[in-house]
């Protein structure tokens, strides 16, 4: 298994993986386009890129699903979002404000930094944007 740095993918591709992770199994490309508010041709190109990189399986006429590599990365991306959002709520932002703010910069925060923040926060399991699992959160004991 490859080591996740948290910086492998540009923000737009991170959003695709997070959406697929939240949706579960096969997701139609038309649903991805409408949820992410992007042109279907852009969705198709991005899915092809993610497929070539081993993050997703595209099943023609059925939909897209995460590979194991995609699932592990997407779980980290979702946890990263939730940990950073929770962090900002500790400093006075409302959950909605924190979620919006984190969406602007989360893709630039590395896994080592998230691991340290997560550890310092006592490995929270509930964030302001959703639950936090710790299979992707390295602990530094």
Image (cartoon, helix red, strand yellow):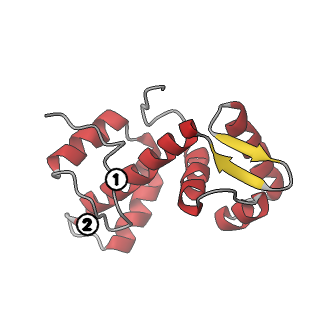
Quarter of the picture holding the C terminus: top left
Corner quadrant of residue 62:
bottom right
Viewer-nearest residue: 88 or 129: 129
Residue at (61, 41) in percent of width and height: 67
| Left or right: 139 as drawn, with respect to 102 | left
| Left or right: 1 as drawn, with respect to 124 | right
Disc 2 target residue: 89
Which label's residue is closer to the chain start, 1 or 2? 2
- Crowding at dot 1, Cα within 10 Å, few <14 / some 14-19 / many 20+, comes out as some
Q: Secondary structure at mark 1?
A: loop
Which circle, 1 or 2, is nearer the viewer?
Answer: 1
Disc 1 target residue: 133
Instruction: Point out residue 140 in the picture as x, y percentages from the top left corner.
Output: 18, 34
Q: Residue furthest top?
A: 2
| Left or right: 83 as drawn, with respect to 12 | left
Number of numbered discs: 2
Instruction: Point out residue 77 in the picture as x, y percentages from the top left corner.
Output: 45, 48
Residue at (31, 54) in percent of width and height: 83
Instruction: Point out residue 71 in the picture as x, y percentages from the top left corner.
Output: 53, 45
Residue at (72, 67) in percent of width and height: 34
Q: Secondary structure at mark 2?
A: helix
Q: Residue furthest right?
A: 61
Label placed on residue 62: none
- Crowding at dot 2, Cα within 10 Å, few <14 / some 14-19 / many 20+, comes out as some
Viewer-nearest residue: 121 or 135: 135
Viewer-nearest residue: 74 or 61: 61
Q: Is mark 1 in CB contact (under 8 Å) with mark 2?
A: no
Corner quadrant of residue 36:
bottom right
Q: In the image, is residue 82 above or below residue 4?
A: below
Residue at (33, 57) in percent of width and height: 132
Instruction: Point out residue 16 in the picture as x, y percentages from the top left corner.
Output: 62, 52
Question: What is the spatial separation of the Cα atoms under label 1 and label 2, in whole angstroms?
Answer: 19 Å
């Amino acid at each position: 298994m490859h080591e996740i740095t948290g910086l492998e993918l540009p923000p737009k591709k991170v959003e695709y993986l997070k959406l697929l992770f939240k949706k579960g199994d096969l997701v139609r490309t038309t649903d991805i386009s409408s949820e992410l508010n992007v042109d279907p041709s852009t969705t198709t190109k991005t899915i092809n890129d993610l497929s070539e990189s081993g993050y997703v399986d595209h099943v023609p006429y059925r939909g897209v699903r995460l590979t194991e590599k995609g699932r592990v990365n997407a779980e980290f991306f979702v946890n990263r979002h939730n940990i950073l959002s929770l962090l900002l709520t500790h400093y006075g932002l409302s959950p909605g404000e924190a979620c919006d703010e984190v969406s602007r910069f989360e893709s630039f925060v590395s896994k080592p930094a998230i691991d340290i923040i997560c550890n310092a926060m006592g490995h929270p399991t509930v964030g302001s944007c959703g639950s936090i699992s710790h299979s992707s959160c390295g602990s530094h004991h």
